Amino acid sequence: MKKLSAALALFASVSLATLASANEMDKRFQPYAPTSGVSGTLKSIGSDSLNNLMTLWAEDFRKAYPSVTIEIEGKGSSTAPPALIAGTAQLGPMSRPMRAAESDQFEAKYGYKPTAVRVAVDTLAVFVNKDNPIACLSLTQLDSIFSVTRNMGGQAIDTWDQAGGTGDFAGKPISLFGRNAASGTYGYFKEVALGNGDYRSTVKEQPGSSAVVQGVAADKYAIGYSGIGYKTADVRAIAVSGRDGQCYEATQENAYKGTYPITRFLYIYVNKNPSAPLDPVLREFFKFVLSADGQDDTNKDGYYPMPYVFATEDVAKISQ
């Protein structure tokens, strides 16, 4: 199996004693304290997975600074680097780390790397219809379902009985929903679940996360992947097993432990000259996002708050 995201190793390295219990944020997070002299216009271009959360953050940030305008466009993580390079956006939300080529292109123009700020934790969920009896699938099975190359070593899985489905699901073809290639979610699932293999041509590629969930909700025999924040009552996030063979639910605790195998950070990239401070409106936006108020929005949107130690590191990064 190809290597998992480095994010899992980071989560596993953090003592659970410093983290909140399930669906709570660390009590050390403090409420955001507004300051004076903050105004301006911000444009955000990037991840669809972060689209709703960016909107929540923008709305609450503007309560503290009514003169600030924030425009949000979420068409996929791949749209963030070109927008930051061109200067058409100040905020570049991404659901995956920036690729080396993207970072190099940015550096070629500005002379330094873009700054990545970790803003939320996501257990990238594998959704099935609420009536589907499947409880758990392994990464190898997911690869066998979604991939034509099957780099994880399994045999092709085309029908639900081949994945353990019984009753009405026996013999029924599996209907596949996924994201399009501009999506960071597409790329991250491809890396972790498909071992960087190729998707089947039968995957119904959707322009947004909500469209994936809607497709699975409307099709009894469907399966799809999306950020956990897009979960609805009509779908179910199944457990996933990795190298140890144990099934792990897509919960905050399993994300923080690093046991749920498709766990990731969600990021906002920004153009920060290491020799100069950030514009005050950008600096305060990030401080808000990584405060108790901002992370409460993260929880409301269905994602998980940042581990406090990482949030503290990134606040220091953008405050320099």
Image: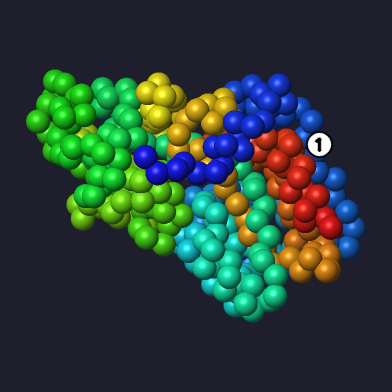
Q: Residue furthest right?
A: 36
User: Position of 116 compared to 7: left or right?
Assistant: right
Q: Is residue 294 visible to us here?
A: yes
With respect to residue 144, does 252 lie above or below? above
Q: Nearer the viewer, residue 154 or 79?
A: 154
Q: Is residue 224 above or below residue 208?
A: above
Where does residue 222 sit, x and y in percent of width and height?
24, 39
**The C terminus sits in image quarter:** bottom right
- 33 or 27: nearer the viewer: 27
Residue at the spot 83% in from the left edge and 69% down from the top edge: 275
**Residue 179 percent location from the top left of the image:** 36, 53
Relative to 140, does residue 186 appear above or below in the rendering? below
Quadrant in the picture for residue 154 = top left
Furthest residue to the left? 171
Residue receiving disc 1: 30
Return the x and y of residue 138 as percentages of the image width and height: 33, 30
Give the residue displayed 65% in from the left and 27% down from the top: 24
Q: Nearer the viewer, residue 218 or 1?
A: 1
Label 1 sits on what residue type? Answer: Gln
Q: Position of residue 90 (x, y in %)?
A: 66, 67
Determine if residue 230 is in view. no
